[in-house]
Image (cartoon, rainbow, N blue to C red):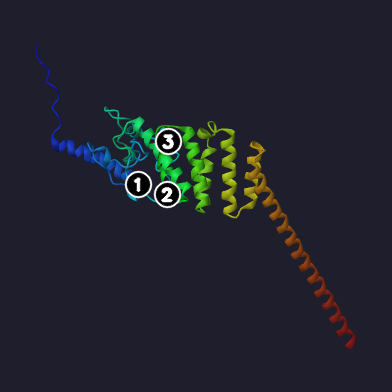
Amino acid sequence: AQVRQPPAAPSPRRALRRESLDRARVQAAMPSVSVVGAGSQDEDVPLLNPAEGGLGGVEVVDSFLGSDDDQPRGYETSDTEFTEDERERRMPKEDGRFYDDPLWYGKTLAEIRGGTEGAKAEGNKASGEGDWKQANRCWKDSLKGAEKIKDLDLQIRLRLNLALGYVKREKPTKALDHCDAIFAADLLVKALPEQRAKAHYRRAEAHSLAGDESKAMASLRACLEIDAGNVEAQRRLAQLRKAEAERRDRERELFKGLAMGDKEFSAREGADEQQEEEEE
């Protein structure tokens, strides 16, 4: 019987070309990120490292995090929006590891989960120290990991954190983006009442920061419909209502003064006309 020979191993040149193509795909998706090659050691892999201590001693650098003002890559992208080739690329390889993104290049799903929690912890620590820029950077990377492992509860908590972080950094549009994402269909069904109430409160803070007090009051009322005992929302709504009443009083006084001025002007003009007639 004829013995079937095992397939020949790819030539070094072909293997190198295949790896180069994989690296090129990652680089095209994340142009600001340095790509590590297959076979790299754990310490070469950026962020989401599962070692003890959150980030496992890997320094968080801008080349891996991108601009702080960028949305996390993969933001609000569902599996149904990917092509078949893209979905296949995002699946684990035969070794059970993922190579579709530099944040978790060469990591297993369990390692990605560990790194995701570690990045969240680093963000919480930075926020406690008042470093909201660093906090947002870590939370955004953690959010990306949470989307990868499809942890909806963690996504909600991270988006609430990011909304707060952007309010602290006076970037209301970005804060509103994360609040809006919580009310999207996939996360809304998972969000607890207290999380929805907090999202409405964060919306109110962002609207107020943007100078839109009417929308801020609407968001606070929505918050109180869910959590009627929210003292902070009650206090803030009372402040906004008082400010709104004072603004209307000032406007009425202004219009009243303008109306009185018009009457006085008309009276003087009438008197002048009458005097001119008498002189004639």
Relative to 206, say whether 79 is above or below. Answer: above
The residue sitting at 56% across, 45% down in the picture is 202
What secondary structure is found at the residue carrying circle 1? loop
Local SS, label 3: helix
Where in the figure is residue 256, as x and y percent of width and height? 78, 65
**Quadrant assignment, res 108:** top left
Viewer-proximal residue among 84 and 224: 224
Q: Distance between the residues labelled 2 and 1?
A: 9 Å
Residue 280 seen in the figure: no
Please state, as top left, top right, bottom left or bottom right, where the N terminus lies in the image: top left
Picture quarter with the C terminus: bottom right
Q: How crowded is mark 3: few (under 14 residues within 10 Å), some or many (20 or more)?
A: many
Judged from this view, the residue extending furthest toward the right is 278
- Are the two marked residues, 3 and 1, in contact with CB atoms closer than 8 angstroms? no
Q: Which quarter of the figure has residue 100?
A: top left
Q: Mark 3 points at which residue?
A: 146
User: Is 223 drawn above or below residue 206 in the view shown?
Assistant: above
Residue 139 placement, left or right of 206 = left
| Disc 2 + disc 1, Cβ < 8 Å | yes
Residue 237, percent from left and from top:
67, 48
Q: Earlier in the sequence, mark 2 or mark 1?
A: 1
Q: Which amino acid does label 2 sit on?
A: Gln
- In the rendered image, the residue lying farthest to the bottom is 279
Local SS, label 2:
helix
Amino acid type for the residue under numbered disc 3: Ala
Dot 1 corresponds to which residue? 60
Residue at the disc numbered 2? 134
Picture mark count: 3
Mark-to-mark CA distance, 2 and 3? 18 Å
Place of residue 62 in the rendered image (x, y in percent of width and height, measured from the top left) = 35, 50
Q: Residues within 10 Å of mark 2 (few under 14, many from 20)?
A: many
Point 34% across, 49% down: residue: 61
